[in-house]
Image (cartoon, rainbow, N blue to C red):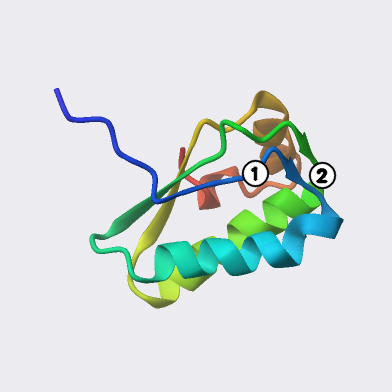
């Protein structure tokens, strides 16, 4: 059995267009210096969100990919999983 992965960052309770730019900046700062090939981010606190949450996560994933790393999102709310599927990008954000 493997140890649970400790997230390096947590998404806020609210992530809409109003919070997207600031959240993206904070997430990029949090994940940039992380060692290892996979960088975990916890989304379990996310309650109020729109498609901006998808855009932020995709951008963080691209940011990490440029460094040869991958983003792993844990605790995805069902509604966010549904949005990812609706946009056809669920495979880009492994949970």
Give the number of the mark in front: 1 or 2: 1
- Tell me what residue is drawn at x 59 percent, y 45 percent: 11
Q: Position of residue 76 (x, y in %)?
A: 57, 33
Q: Does 74 sit left or right of 34 as displayed?
A: right
Q: Does 93 sit left or right of 87 as displayed?
A: left
Q: Is residue 1 above or below residue 33?
A: above
Q: Does 95 sit left or right of 21 as displayed?
A: left
Quadrant in the picture for residue 12: top right
Q: Which mark is residue 12?
A: 1
- Tell me what residue is drawn at x 84 percent, y 57 percent: 17
Q: Which residue is mark 2?
A: 50
Q: Position of residue 41 (x, y in %)?
A: 46, 47
- Which residue occupies the foreground of this view, 46 or 82? 46
- Tell me what residue is drawn at x 69 percent, y 35 percent: 80
Label 2: few (<14), some (14–19) or many (≥20) C-alpha neighbours in 10 Å? some
Q: Position of residue 64 (x, y in %)?
A: 43, 68
Label 1: few (<14), some (14–19) or many (≥20) C-alpha neighbours in 10 Å? some
Q: Is residue 92 above or below residue 78?
A: below
Distance from disc 1 to disc 2, alpha carbons, whole Å, reads 13 Å
- Tell me what residue is drawn at x 29 percent, y 38 percent: 5
Single out the residue that lies furthest toward the bottom: 66
Q: Which of the two labelled residues, at mark 1 and mark 2, occupies the earlier sequence position?
A: 1
- Element assignment for label 1: loop
- Which residue occupies the foreground of this view, 24 or 73? 24
Single out the residue that lies furthest toward the left: 1
């Amino acid at each position: 059995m493997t140890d649970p992965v400790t997230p390096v960052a947590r998404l806020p309770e609210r992530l809409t267009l109003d919070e997207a730019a600031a959240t993206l900046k904070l997430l990029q700062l949090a994940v940039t210096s992380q060692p290892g090939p996979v960088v975990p981010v916890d989304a379990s606190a996310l309650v109020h969100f729109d498609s901006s949450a998808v855009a932020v996560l995709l951008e963080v994933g691209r940011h990490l990919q440029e460094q040869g790393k991958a983003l792993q999102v844990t605790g995805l709310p069902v509604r966010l999983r549904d949005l990812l599927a609706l946009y056809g990008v669920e495979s880009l954000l492994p949970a």
